[in-house]
Image (cartoon, grey):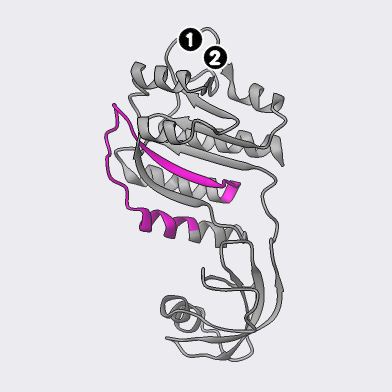
Amino acid sequence: MQPIFYDADLTAQQNQFILKEPESKHAIKVLRLSVNDTLILVNGKGLIAKAKVIDAHPKRCAVLITDKHENYNPLPYYLHVAVAPTKNIDRIEWFVEKATEVGISEISFLLSDNSERKVVKIERLQKVAVAAMKQSQKAFLPKINTIEKFDKFVNIHQNFKHKFIAHCADEENKNQWAKIIREKSDSKALILIGPEGDFSKNEINLALALGFEPVALGNFRLRTETAALYATMIYSANNL
């Protein structure tokens, strides 16, 4: 398998390209690529290109693009998962990695009443997503947003056509996520996933008042990151 390199500045109009220093170092020093060796370039926006090395410089590796495809293998759906980050950031990194591999369009982070973590380092999570995109041979990188207060987030997204809130509070009219997704004909959705202590009653009431539909993620209580990945996998499986 040819190695994959990422650069957001790659465009379909370019016939030659110079990798930035970190990717150049990885290509030449780590993978030991040399002139005429081939590789794959992606820009995270659907462009994938085959190329060969024409200057094996460890700080500015130059390549000649030999073939390219735009809008390569896009997701047939749009899924936006907004999740309250866990106290242990490794769990959120795990979710970002696996959700990118499975297929997710956008990830947001919620600052809710019961949140134990109030800061996330977006640059670190973007690196995790890039690595997962390359590992799974994708050309699209999910959009990752900074943390937002719950009430502000739900007000901004109240016009989203299909929007859901997953919570553990007792409620008779909650549908199972797996069931309701099979019944939706539209392939664009937003789902909110709460922190370890769940969403507060005020947050649930606010979301419901703004038209978010309550859903359950199975019959067992899941960790935050597990719930977020479960929601992603079920949505992907029902829309591929």
Residue drawn at (27%, 40%) of the image: 118
Q: Residue furthest top?
A: 172
Q: Along the horizontal axis of the image, is 146 left or right of 105?
A: left
Magenta span contains residue 110: yes
Q: Residue 5 got which mark?
A: none
Looking at the image, which is closer to me, 50 or 154?
154
Residue drawn at (48%, 9%) of the image: 171
Q: Quadrant of residue 20?
A: bottom left
Q: Which residue is mark 2?
A: 174
Magenta-drawn segment: 101-129
Tell me if label 2 and label 1 are in contact, CB under 8 Å: yes
- In the image, is residue 89 above or below residue 199? below
Q: Residue 171 got which mark?
A: 1
Q: Along the horizontal axis of the image, is 203 left or right of 103?
A: left
x, y percent for residue 6: 53, 69
x, y percent for residue 160: 55, 34
Q: Please state which amino acid type lies under the numbered disc 2.
A: Lys
